[in-house]
Image (spheres, rainbow, N blue to C red):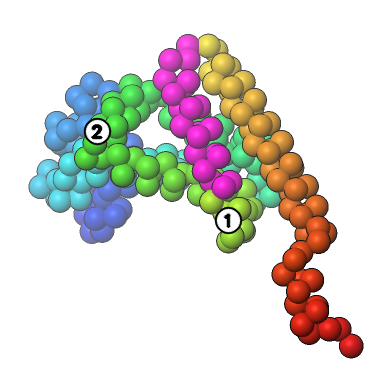
Amino acid sequence: MSNLADATLDEIRAALAPRIATNAAFDGWAAPARDIAADALGIDRDIAALALPDAPAMIDAWFAAIDAVMLEKAPAEHCATLKVRDRIAALVGARIEAVTPHREALRRALAILALPQNMALGARLAWRTVDTIWHTAGDTATDYNHYTKRTILLGVYAATMTILLNDESEGQAETRAFLARRIDGIMRFEKAKAGFLRRARHRPSLSRFVGRLRYPVV
């Protein structure tokens, strides 16, 4: 395609990734799937191999493309009009919608990421997604809340994708119901945590008491 003639490697990766995913359902995350995608886009196969040399690189690019689709379907300005619970549901739901037509490619991708040499990459990609979700949902925490929120959502997200792989219900109703229950759990936890922190701020503090003895208020 002429519009990719002067494309950067990042642009080539973004263009190739969705087409490779379509082919990966049949050919696996391997060179044949990449070559077919490159031919369809008019990209030289050697350049495609330079941009996406192996299965982990292809999967990384595809997951990034799915995240981009998720943000198109549930943009930050739309999420800002929703309650936090509904923001998370909208974003994960958008990702479910984006990946559902490619469940076999996802199944093969997750099998590759489960290999010992790829587990660190799999964790990084999953963290990237949940971080994107919380950021788009408006979370600005920089303390330990930043990590607890993402860690909890990571478990929910991973379980939801596992359910999705075998969900044959109409509109993936079973997956969405599972997600709704788990998000309810997250919100209950966040509410309980916030209450605990509020109470903790008003509890007697030995360090503050000692400090006042040493430096009395005048």
Q: Amino acid at mark 1?
A: Tyr
Residue 7 is situated, as x and y percent measured from the top left of the image, at: 26, 56
Q: Read off the magenta span.
A: 148-168
Residue depicted at x 78% and y 59%: 201
Residue 94 visible (yes or no): no
Residue depicted at x 59% and y 22%: 178
Residue occupying the far left of the picture: 46
Q: Nearer the viewer, residue 212 or 107?
A: 212
Residue 212's quadrant in the figure? bottom right
- Residue assigned mark 1: 144
Residue 159 is situated, as x and y percent measured from the top left of the image, at: 48, 27
State the separation of the CA atoms marked 2 and 1: 30 Å
Q: Amino acid at mark 2?
A: Leu
Q: Secondary structure at mark 2?
A: loop
Residue 118 is situated, as x and y percent measured from the top left of the image, at: 25, 40
Q: Please indicate whether residue 147 sits to the left or right of residue 184 in the image.
A: left
Residue 205 visible (yes or no): yes
Answer with mark 2 or mark 1, whichever residue precedes in sequence.
2
Q: Nearer the viewer, residue 45 or 167?
A: 167
User: In the rendered view, would you say 142 is above or below 161?
Assistant: below
- Residue assigned mark 2: 115
User: In the rendered view, would you say 187 is above or below 76?
Assistant: above
Q: Please indicate whether residue 4 sits to the left or right of residue 81 in the image.
A: left
